[in-house]
Image (cartoon, coloured by chain):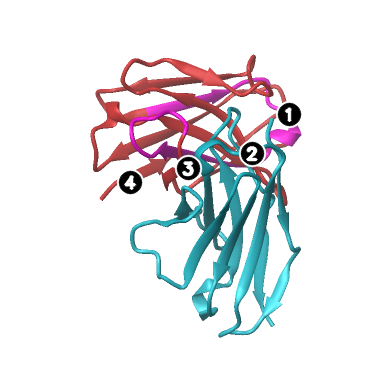
Chain colours: A red, B cyan
Amino acid sequence: QVQLVQSGADMKKPGASVNVSCTASGYVFTTYYIHWVRQAPGQGFQWMGIINPGGGSTSYGQSFQDRITLTRDTSTSTVHMELRNLRSDDTAVYYCVRSFGDYPFNWFDPWGQGTLVTVSS
Amino acid sequence: EIVLTQSPGPLSLSPGERVTVSCRASQSLRDNNLAWYQQKPGQAPRLLIYGASSRATGIPDRFSGSGSGTDFTLTISSLEPEDFAVYFCQQYSFSPLTFGRGTKVEIK
């Protein structure tokens, strides 16, 4: 079945960078856009960015523009999310999600299982 | 950016009761591009409804969505024990994609 499997929880100090990976299976990796969203404790979801696994093009949310990089590895069907210069308010569960169909902005299905990133000194 | 406002706040209900959750957008959503998700503690969200009213694969027909423009509704016709969860909406008409804050449905 279609599945997104993320890397495990991570803990970082303020100012550090974190890398979260998302490995896709059950479909042709290059034909569906992947987004990243996050959910801070007690908060709603926040959209972070999108990558086209086919060509590698990306677009980022304004709040993350200068701190996030999305890349993909087609040989392993994996998308990587790097977030730099971490702050305590980056503590959140990070999700990769697939955009339904071949349109970049659509509903999300499926979701990865989520990766808790804790930023603390 | 589009703001999605959900109401009501947390609901305490009994199995068998009907639930209605509202999601209001700050601008009209093109093509009714609104989805609903269910999230249980410690789990990833699950897609329930897309295009405002289309049920996702495998979703029971007690879940329904309606609305257009700026006002949308998720209805659960008769709560089952497994339906106690948080429900939230998402718009995908405009970038950045945005989400409602969620409505918690808990057992009374």
Q: Give the answer, above or below, for where B12 lies relative to B97.
A: below
The secondary structure type at the circle numbered 1 is loop
Residue A85 drawn at (x, y percent): 68, 20
Identify the image quadrant of residue B20: bottom right
Q: Is residue A23 left or right of residue A42?
A: left
Q: Mark 1 sits on what residue?
A: A87
* C-alpha gap between disc 2 and disc 4: 33 Å
Going by the numbered disc 1, the residue's amino acid type is Arg
Do callouts 2 and 4 mark residues in contact (Cβ within 8 Å)? no
* C-alpha gap between disc 3 and disc 4: 16 Å
Residue B41 sits inside the magenta stretch: no
Residue A51 drawn at (x, y percent): 44, 23
The secondary structure type at the circle numbered 2 is loop
Q: Mark 2 sits on what residue?
A: B28
Residue A14 drawn at (x, y percent): 72, 27
Camera-nearest residue between B80 and A90: B80
Going by the numbered disc 2, the residue's amino acid type is Ser
Residue A89 sits inside the magenta stretch: yes
